[in-house]
């Protein structure tokens, strides 16, 4: 018999709660007797009538029934963009741009002023360094935000569902923590031209394929902020018979590349083993700083082109190049850091697990006439320790791992190689804090942590820190 959760008794009850702070996801946090309650959509300083909807091991989750009254406690240092006329709500509350914000799982912070969201992200980084990294002394700088924190995404993944009644595909985004689709044809995070494609393509697919359109489960759109061209990738369970008609109806400007990936398992990942280009170019052209990037369908590219320029500039500054450094770019993707740093160092070597991204990186180096970079296909935790064993030395390492952070063998190899400076770029404060702790224990000293808002309106935050070897181990 599974053990009964005593917090379950609260579920279904309605409580009046005072929101005291944010949790890391941007939900309001309140105390109910000695239990913590997370309330999405509620802000610190608000008193809210809340229906408890779920009980977890250590906390409850509630949904807002109604706002009751605003408390005197407001968040420190947070001016309102929108002095709310409604005195029941926090002055930092703003009207969400998106009509499905409260249901869609894509954004979490549209209901607070952008200044508040930036400060919240700074605190998320600080909390992780304290609670997970157990760092005693550190500095987190104010988050670098965007002047216009909307319509910044250069790619979007849209789940599709076939409605047998209307014989049409419907599109939208997954609700938070679920695979049920919140229907919408718009998203304020992508350029208007992407919204147009997002609305038009499912309609065209339904018209051309009829019932067969039920095989199409995802629409992926990549958009070049530089050329305004688009790549459309269809995720399908099986290749439709009338693919030629589909190409004819979809392959028009701004779509310059049309591709398909077959994934037979309906509950499997979006991408199949391969991607077939059905029409047009095999890659999209984007530009960062002065460097042109070719991006093929599966290659990772920073989703926010404008802020990627901020990020690369920042990482470059933190590398403190003199011009004669040998640099490691671990988890290099299509070579974002290597290629934008190439003129500032002697030689840069990138490692990346996804082979097509490495092919793009090599091609990108060639196209830009950059000769002092090379890229290796492989997982960093295998390649780097081998190189270090072979005596290959680096002056600077840039590491930009996925959300799960660096494999312990990567951190050990960095330490073992006595690399004087490590510039860590992270999209997950929790794993950043974990990994920084390991590097600090091995003798590295972190500089100021710089959060960058790569994903406005969402609860994600990017962070850059340089760590300098303060002593050399034998
Ligand atoms: C956060 S992205 C950074 C990409 C690149 N630095 C950029 O800014 O465009 C992480 C990259 O690591 C790659 N990756 C994930 N796990 C890896 C591993 N164990 N070894 C090598 N690359 C890995 C992913 O394919 C992805 O390209």
Image: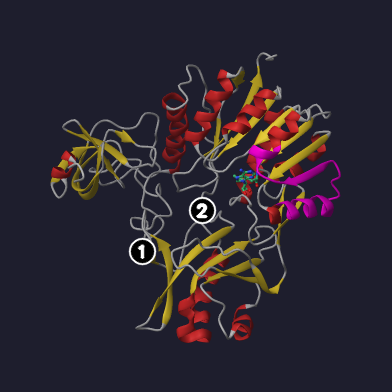
In this rendering, the answer to whether 195 lies above or below 212 is: above
- The spot of residue 368 in percent (x, y) is 82, 51
Q: Is residue 184 visible in the rendered structure shown here?
A: yes
In the picture, measured across the screen, residue 14 lies left or right of residue 108, that is left
In this rendering, the answer to whether 136 lies above or below 92 is: above
Q: Which mark is residue 256?
A: none
- The spot of residue 327 in percent (x, y) is 76, 33
Question: Which SS class for mark 1?
Answer: loop
In this rendering, the answer to whether 294 lies above or below 333 is: below
In the picture, measured across the screen, residue 110 lies left or right of residue 384, that is left
Figure quadrant of residue 194: bottom right
In the picture, measured across the screen, residue 171 lies left or right of residue 405, that is left
Name the residue rendered at 63%, 67% in the picture.
275
Q: Which residues make up the magenta segment?
A: 358-383
In this rendering, the answer to whether 310 lies above or below 230 is: above
Residue 434 located within the stretch drawn in magenta: no
Task: Count neighbours of disc 1 (C-alpha within 10 A) and say few if under 14, some if 14 to 19, many if 20 or more.
Answer: some
Residue behind mark 2: 150
Name the residue rendered at 80%, 44% in the picture.
374
Q: Which mark is residue 180?
A: 1
Figure quadrant of residue 5: top left
Q: How far is the residue under mark 1 from the one under mark 2? A: 25 Å
- The spot of residue 33 in percent (x, y) is 16, 32
In front: 228, or 390?
Answer: 390
Residue 382 located within the stretch drawn in magenta: yes
């Amino acid at each position: 018999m599974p053990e009964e959760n005593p917090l379950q008794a609260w579920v279904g009850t309605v409580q009046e709660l005072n929101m005291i702070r944010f949790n890391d996801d941007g939900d309001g946090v309140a105390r109910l007797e000695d239990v913590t309650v997370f309330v999405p959509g509620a802000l610190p300083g608000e008193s809210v009538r809340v229906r408890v909807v779920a009980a977890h091991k250590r906390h409850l989750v509630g949904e807002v029934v109604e706002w009751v009254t605003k408390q005197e406690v407001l968040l420190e240092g947070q001016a309102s963009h929108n002095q709310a006329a409604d005195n029941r709500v926090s002055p930092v509350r703003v009207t969400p741009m998106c009509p499905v914000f409260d249901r869609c799982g894509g954004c979490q912070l549209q209901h607070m002023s952008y200044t508040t969201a930036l400060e919240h992200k700074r605190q998320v980084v600080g909390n992780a360094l304290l609670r997970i990294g157990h760092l005693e002394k550190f500095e987190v700088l104010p988050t670098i935000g965007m002047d216009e924190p909307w319509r910044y995404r250069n790619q979007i993944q849209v789940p599709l569902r076939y409605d047998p009644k209307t014989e049409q595909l419907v599109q939208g985004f997954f609700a938070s923590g679920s695979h049920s689709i919140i229907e919408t044809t718009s998203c304020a995070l992508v350029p208007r031209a992407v919204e147009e494609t997002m609305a038009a393509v499912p309609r065209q697919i339904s018209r051309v394929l009829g019932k067969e359109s039920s095989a199409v489960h995802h629409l992926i759109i990549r958009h070049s902020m530089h050329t305004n061209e688009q790549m459309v990738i269809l995720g399908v369970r099986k290749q439709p018979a009338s693919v030629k008609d589909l190409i004819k109806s979809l392959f028009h400007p701004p779509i310059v590349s049309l591709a398909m990936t077959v994934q037979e398992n309906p509950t499997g990942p979006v991408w199949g083993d391969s991607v077939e280009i059905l029409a047009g170019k095999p890659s999209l052209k984007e530009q960062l700083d002065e460097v042109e990037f070719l991006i093929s369908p599966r290659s990772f590219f920073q989703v926010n082109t404008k802020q990627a320029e901020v990020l690369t500039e920042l990482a470059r500054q933190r590398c403190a190049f003199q011009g004669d450094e040998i640099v490691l770019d671990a988890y290099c993707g299509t070579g974002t850091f290597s290629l934008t740093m190439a003129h500032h160092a002697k030689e840069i070597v990138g490692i990346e697990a996804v082979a097509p991204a490495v092919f793009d990186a090599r091609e990108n180096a060639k196209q830009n006439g950059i000769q002092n970079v090379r890229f290796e296909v492989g997982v960093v935790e295998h390649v780097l320790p081998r190189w270090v064993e072979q005596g290959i030395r680096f002056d600077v390492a840039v590491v930009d791992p996925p959300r799960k952070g660096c494999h312990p063998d990567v951190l050990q190899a960095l330490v073992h190689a006595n690399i004087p400076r490590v510039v860590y770029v992270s999209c997950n404060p929790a794993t950043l804090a974990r990994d920084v702790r390991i590097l600090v224990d091995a003798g590295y000293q972190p500089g100021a942590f710089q959060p960058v808002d790569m994903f406005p309106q969402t609860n994600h935050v990017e962070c850059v820190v340089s760590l300098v070897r303060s002593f050399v181990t034998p």
